[in-house]
Image (cartoon, grey):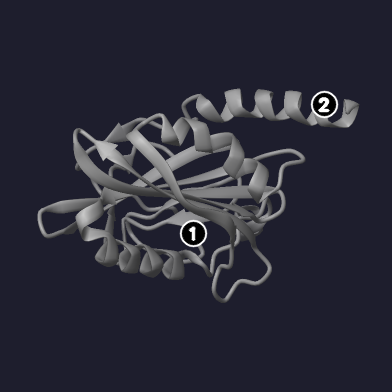
Amino acid sequence: MLKRMNIAVFLSGAALALASSPAAAECVIGSAPLFDPFAPYKEPGAIVHKDSGFIFPANIAGFRRQCEMTTDFSGNNFEIGYLRDFEDHEIEIKIAIIHLEQLNAEDHYKIVKPDLLSRYSSAAVVSEGGYFVSGRPDITAYQGIFDGDKDSVPWHFSVTALDYGYWDARLSASYPQEIDVAAQESIMELITAFQWQTPTGDQVKAAIP
């Protein structure tokens, strides 16, 4: 019983940390393309989180990054958004890279689930459970898929938590329910495009001469 109480207290504290706004640089719409000289895949406009080495291209798999940044991200909790247009609708993706002590992918998912559900009316769980990342059997992941309403429009949304070890990642997706099939295909394209990356503490440092 004591062990369960300790875990509950720990998760509660972690939930407060994750609920706060991610540490981020100022977002500037339409700024000049950025270039990080230490990016292993030197693409103009790419943003690199220097602590983990994770790369966020300006455009990837049909998605466009929502904004440019005046400086690189720093810290253990940050998030970048992507959008893709489809038939007068938008598919919105939020990708976060976070360092979480003693939490696995399922714990991560359970922390963010209540906050995500609170953003929609009549929210209901469609499915939840372990998630297999194709081509990456080394990654443990947990996913929840939900239905709800946003401004009286039927909406579909999901969150996938991924455990890389020191770093954890979270991908949240949101879009109108009427484009569900096309949106799921687009999201899979995005996941496939990102799956070669593994955030590590030494990736960028090793590239610095």
Asked which quadrant contains residue 27, the reply is top left
* Tally of marks: 2
Residue in front for this viewpoint, 182 or 52: 182
Specify which label sits upstream in the sequence, 2 or 1: 2
Say which amino acid is labelled 2. Answer: Asn
Is 92 on the left-hand or right-hand side of 51?
left
Is 123 on the left-hand or right-hand side of 110?
left
Q: Secondary structure at mark 1?
A: loop
Residue in front for this viewpoint, 9 or 56: 9
Within 10 angstroms of label 2, few (less than 14), some, or many (20 or more) residues?
Answer: few
Distance in Å between CA atoms under marks 2 and 1: 41 Å
Q: Quadrant of the C terminus?
A: bottom right
Q: Secondary structure at mark 2?
A: helix
Residue 73 visible at all: no
| Rendering coords of residue 8 (x, y %) | 74, 28
- Label 2 sits on residue: 6
Residue 115 visible at all: yes
Q: Quadrant of the N terminus?
A: top right
Say which amino acid is labelled 1. Answer: Ala
Residue 21 vertical position relative to residue 84 in the rendered view, above or below: above
Residue in front for this viewpoint, 144 or 28: 144
Checking the image for residue 90, the label placed there is none
Residue 29 vertical position relative to residue 56 in the rendered view, above or below: above
Checking the image for residue 39, the label placed there is 1
